[in-house]
Image (cartoon, rainbow, N blue to C red):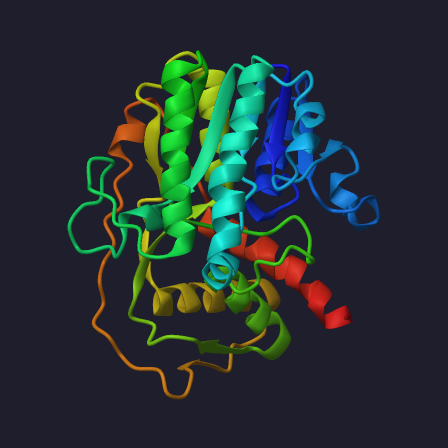
């Protein structure tokens, strides 16, 4: 493992993975793949090597993959964009993955880590969700990732390429910079509200449960597979979650607790937005038992992630 390319490397998750690998594997060359123009490269990314490509432009891929031995593939359209433009989501998330892996195979890239999503399972019920559960993707973001999983598995089985697919639950934590457009995510949104208004307004009843995993643990999982068990990836399919089912109201209360401890200021209220109903809570049991059998363990610190997100959010006060 000498040269790692992270597609979507300037994004919310990709940036944190890059930062973790740089800190823990200083002898490894970390390359961030992006389609952003050079003038929009954030300051934190300057120490990294950069390559510019577009999954919709196949001719841009071969050069981006030169000299790479490990590929971490995160570049994709997000949930909202996929829903609004399903045809483009198929082009980027699914066919883009196929084109990328075709070039990776041609370049003899040894290892590929692909980030899928827990959304491939469809609506989560109270039963335990394991990798053995049937998948029921119900919207373009989920279905395009589910199709891409099969493409990744094909290359793993037939192209002498070691592959792993992570079905990620809800990763949360501080982004690398304010311009990363993931402030609609529940932890990030509530941290921003805490700093700017000291008033937390939920966009739901607050009773819904989700599984959350810190972005630090996401980076640790990638590091675990690349460094600790580089030749023991099993069948290459793993749930990646935090074994942390929290209601949205509990998230708001945790953000308020950390904010008040950090700043000495008081959160004025936690309330539900007008017109939002109150569905019954559904606890999430997203199992990572299979992942833990590889020797991986969770170490994420929720309070620390919130504290650092709050610190970053102070930048909104100066805009």
**Residue at point 22%, 62% (across, down):** 282
Quarter of the image where the N terminus is located? top right
- Residue 169 in the image: state x and y as whole percent: 38, 47
In the displayed image of the protein, which residue is found farthest to the bottom? 274
In the displayed image of the protein, which residue is found farthest to the left? 127
In the picture provided, is 311 more to the left or to the right than 298?
right
| Residue 42 sits above or below residue 163 on the image | below
- Residue 25 in the image: state x and y as whole percent: 62, 22
| Residue 154 sits above or below residue 288 on the image | above
- Residue 40 in the image: state x and y as whole percent: 79, 50
In the picture provided, is 77 more to the left or to the right than 154?
right
**Residue at point 44%, 11% (across, down):** 160
Quarter of the image where the C terminus is located? bottom right
The quadrant where residue 150 appears: top left
In the picture provided, is 47 more to the left or to the right than 142?
right
Residue 314 versus residue 52: which sits nearer the camera?
52
């Amino acid at each position: 493992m000498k040269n790692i390319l992270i597609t979507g490397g300037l994004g919310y998750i990709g940036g944190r993975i890059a930062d973790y690998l740089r800190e823990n594997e200083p002898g490894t060359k970390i390359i961030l793949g992006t389609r952003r123009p050079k003038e929009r490269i954030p300051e934190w990314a300057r120490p990294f090597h950069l390559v510019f490509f577009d999954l919709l432009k196949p001719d841009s891929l071969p050069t981006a993959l030169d000299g790479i031995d490990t590929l971490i593939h995160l570049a994709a359209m997000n949930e909202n964009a996929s829903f609004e433009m399903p045809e483009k989501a198929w082009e980027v998330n699914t066919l883009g993955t196929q084109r990328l892996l075709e070039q990776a195979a041609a370049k003899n890239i040894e290892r590929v880590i692909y980030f899928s999503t827990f959304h491939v399972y469809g609506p989560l019920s109270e039963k335990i969700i394991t990798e053995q559960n049937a998948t029921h993707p119900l919207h373009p973001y989920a279905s395009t990732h589910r199709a891409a999983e099969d493409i990744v598995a094909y290359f793993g089985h037939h192209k002498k390429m070691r592959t792993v697919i992570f079905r990620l639950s809800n990763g949360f934590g501080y982004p690398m910079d304010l311009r990363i457009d993931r402030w609609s995510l529940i932890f990030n949104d509530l941290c921003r509200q805490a700093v700017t208004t000291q008033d937390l307004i939920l966009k739901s009843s607050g009773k819904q449960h989700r599984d959350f995993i810190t972005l630090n643990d996401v980076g640790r999982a990638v590091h675990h597979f690349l460094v600790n068990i580089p030749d023991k990836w099993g069948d290459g399919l793993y749930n990646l979650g935090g074994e942390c089912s929290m209601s949205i109201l509990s998230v708001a209360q945790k953000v308020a607790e950390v904010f008040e401890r950090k700043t000495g200021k008081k959160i004025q209220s936690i309330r539900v937005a007008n017109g939002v109903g109150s569905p019954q809570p559904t606890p999430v049991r997203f199992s990572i038992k299979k992942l833990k059998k590889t020797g991986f363990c969770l170490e994420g610190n929720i309070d620390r992630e919130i504290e650092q997100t709050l610190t970053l959010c102070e930048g909104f006060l100066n805009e």
